[in-house]
Amino acid sequence: MEPLTLAIPTGRLFPEAVALLQRLRLLDAPPPERALVLPGPEGGRILVAKPLDILTYVEHGAADAGIVGQDLLLEQEADVYELADLGFGACRAVVAVPAGREALLAGSAPLRVATRYPRVTARFFEQARRPVEVIVLHGALELAPQVGLADAIVDLVMTGRTLRANRLVEVAEVFRSTARLVVNRVSLRLKAPGVRALLEAVAPAVQAT
Amino acid sequence: MRLRPGPRQRWAALPRGLRDLAPAEAARHLRVVGRLRATFRAWGYREVLTPALEYLETLVHGGGPGIQDRLFKVVGRRGELLALRPDLTVSIARLAATRLLPDAAGPLRLAYVAPVYREQEEGRGRLREFTQAGVERLGEDGVDADAEVIALAVEALRRAGIARPVVTVGHIGFLDDALGALPPETRDALVARLYRKQFAGIEATVPHRHLGAFLRELPLLQGGDALAAARAVVRTERGEAALAGLEALLGRLEEHGVGEAVAVDLSIIRDFSYYTGVVFEGYGAGSGYPLLGGGRYDGLLAAFGTPAPATGFALGVDRVVALVADGEEELDVLIAWAGPTARASALRLARGLRETGAAVIAEPGRSWEETLDRAGREGARWVMWVDGDGARVRRLRGDGPAVERRVPVAGAADVVAAADAHQVAAGPEVGAWSH
């Protein structure tokens, strides 16, 4: 059976991705988060990459499979097979506006929305038939409404604490997301036994969480 | 490689996704193209050339409205919209349906090698101009036509230099049927999911449990198991016919001698909307993308006015070239003459060698040593130094014993022919000339 190269993301999903690989005996000890390539069992490899880059590695076949948040699958529209819901890393993306301005969304005044998910955001408002102007930011989105850069934001929420601390109110849910297992379309054919073994290993481990 | 700081003006740059091929890269590219052309010809497929620009209507009429956003468009002088072809299949369907098929006595076997143009997203490392090589078999239905085209696909990949190609085969009719009983909204949502290859949680979107379980397994259902599993979810004659057709096709592919390179894959969904039956994709180790794709498109010729069944494939030449190891060099002989008195006989020698198909450089030289250096840098297999009536001939590369002789100029070509004939007799390597 040909060994697989598996890409896992740094950041939010890293601890649980590592725990999963340890349960599957693909990793012995938790690696340092700044490691880049780790040896896996039987000649396989584990790549540690930025969350935004996981799908690029898998789409090009530099990694056979990867663990990635569904939020990025929705945003990047990479040509990969999404084969399993890993269950962890649950979060929601919501539209939030400054407290007291909840009526903004229903109105027809031009709306500027800051987000790190420009495509998903554009699609969401298109379906809602609400014309908006999307502004791409890469972090600390809650700042944008405070300084007048945007009227609303679309961002992930886990507990809602950050929103409350910045006097923002959720007005709509855009999507829910969990970590997913993705596989390159060629690896799925040329390394089918390895992919099948990985999927079968993942299924019970996921249900146990 | 040395990267020079260059001028930053736009006139010195190439647009994103376009590139030049310098001689060495062009030679690699053309070597693969040459092998593909020879393979198509060996199977009786005759090459056609069509224009790179077509009416926008033609391309959308054949490729479906989804193609529009990926086309490069050109506005003609009278406001008519033209576009660069994104593939050859639609252009060849137009040509065949409007001109060739109405007069043809029987089925047509056509081939092409040509650049195609598609708008690509930024930052994904995708080319906007790339070369496709492929065949179309027009006017014939049935398993024999499908089998021939798929066997040729395997053969083309092998001849191009892919050591162990894999071609997976599926059928559009099977999924159409398996999903046919579902309410339209459910089916549309499911098809959208399948296009996005989004299989996680797919079982929750269908009301029937066994269909859900089957869809979940679909991407991993390959080989004989796939057909058996598929039978359990098929409900109509059309679906059963699709599966029976696939089974017969696999048998034919065994008879073509490519059985071990072919696998069933019922999850294949091709990007182009014109496919109607058997679909397939070809892969090689080392590339994360398919190397070729194709299938049956029985509706496309009718759309252009002459109903006829059709099947074919397109191979991504650039993807194959990227996988194929550097081959032999292109230059066979470098000839240098010692002075004006030797020039005429050296040029006559070059003419004679070129007539046999050899690639030859002939140029004035200063000394035997300098000519040897030149020949080494050019990657020549043979070097010849012509001074007066004599020639010094040496083999620089190639199997077999070393050769170095001093012969009359008229006999120089025979030295090469004799040594290369010996090499052909001794080994499995290519013919007298290396390409």
Image (tube, coloured by chain):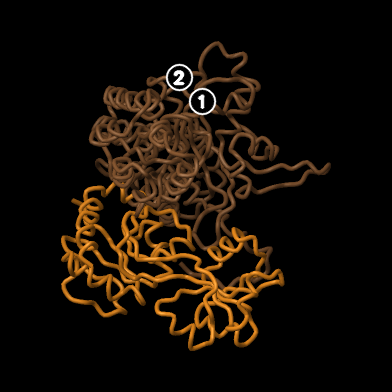
Q: Position of residue B103 (x, y in %)?
A: 62, 13
B386 or B88, nearer to the observer: B88
The colour assigned to chain B within the rendered structure: brown
Of B22 and B236, the residue lying toward us: B236
Q: Residue A185's mark?
A: none
Residue type marked 1: Asp
Which chain is indicated by disc 2? B
Quadrant containing the C terminus of chain B is top left
Q: Dot 2 lies on which element?
A: loop
> What residue is at 40 percent from the left and 71 percent from the top?
A91
Q: Which residue is mark 1?
A: B298
Disc 1 crowd, CA 10 A, few/some/many (<14, 14-19, 20+): many
Q: Are marks 1 and 2 on the same chain?
A: yes
Residue at the spot of label 2 = B141
Say what secondary structure mark 1 lies in. Answer: loop
Inter-mark Cα distance, 1 to 2: 8 Å
Tell me: residue B40, above or below residue A21: above
Q: Is residue B404 visible?
A: no
Q: Quadrant of the N terminus of chain B?
A: bottom left
Q: Colour of chain A?
A: orange
**Is B45 situated above or below B293?**
above
Chain containing the residue with disc 1: B
Q: Residue furthest top?
A: B105
Which residue shows up at 38% across the image and 20% down it?
B144
Question: Can the viewer see residue B378?
Answer: yes
Quarter-wise, where is residue B31 in the image?
Answer: top left
Q: Position of residue B353 (x, y in %)?
A: 46, 34
Who comes first in sequence, dot 1 or dot 2? 2
